[in-house]
Amino acid sequence: DADVTQTPRNRITKTGKRIMLECSQTKGHDRMYWYRQDPGLGLRLIYYSFDVKDINKGEISDGYSVSRQAQAKFSLSLESAIPNQTALYFCATMRSGTYNEQFFGPGTRLTVL
Amino acid sequence: QQQVKQSPQSLIVQKGGISIINCAYENTAFDYFPWYQQFPGKGPALLIAIRPDVSEKKEGRFTISFNKSAKQFSLHIMDSQPGDSATYFCAASMRFPGGNQFYFGTGTSLTVIP
């Protein structure tokens, strides 16, 4: 099921580099989210967008920025990567309305050396 | 500060046994409590969810028990199977103008021994 895709799936980069993680969805959902997953810390919200013109900070937005290029595309950027941004990053989508399911992409494993 | 506290961090259960994972929250604005299941190399996927107006929800071998006064909820997996071995996350959602925001627990790694 490739309804939510993330590219790249794996990335190794160096401290100080700018990197962009991309998310695309074919589900037609208007809400999109970026999370990072760290062992022992679970999933933490970085940014979320309820429609193309709406961008909101989550719990841990420092050091990250996002762009919602279209309803189907939501990109996460690390302007100057640092080692503690090494993590597994997930994009999720959700249809508008209450009590709906979030659909997650397969994740991007990012390593910052 | 962790909005949703989850325990245990890891759990080993014999095949056929009952797996129990617990979560607690403080914010009474939460109004939707999903559980997600994650297999290695995959994104989390919704397993079962409950709203606070009911005390229990059952879907097959999976049951959520919800205690609104104690602000606690738990996942029970009956007749646990090796294929249930995965990481489980509880979550809580609250509504904002225009949408919902989700807060996740720290996850429980479940291993079911054949």
Image (cartoon, coloured by chain):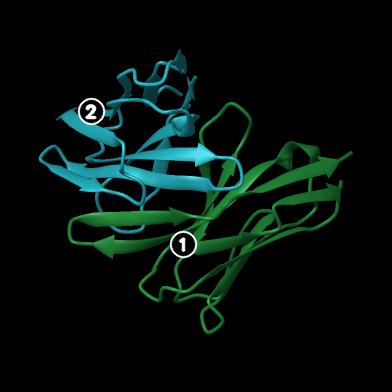
User: Does residue A18 appear in the picture of this structure?
Assistant: yes
What amino acid type is highlighted by mark number 2? Ala
Q: Do badges 1 and 2 share one subunit?
A: no
Q: Is residue B12 left or right of residue A38?
A: right
Residue drawn at point x = 57 percent, y = 63 percent: B5
Q: Compared to B4, does B107 lie above or below?
A: above
Q: Which mark is residue A72?
A: 2
For disc 1, the marked residue is B1
Callout 2: chain: A
What amino acid type is highlighted by mark number 1? Gln
Q: Compared to A13, does A79 lie above or below?
A: below
Task: Using the rendered view, name the quadrant where residue B64 is placed.
Answer: bottom right
Q: Is residue A8 left or right of residue A80?
A: right
In the rendering, at what x and y percent does residue A45 appear?
A: 38, 46
Residue drawn at point x = 64 percent, y = 61 percent: B63
Chain B palette colour: green
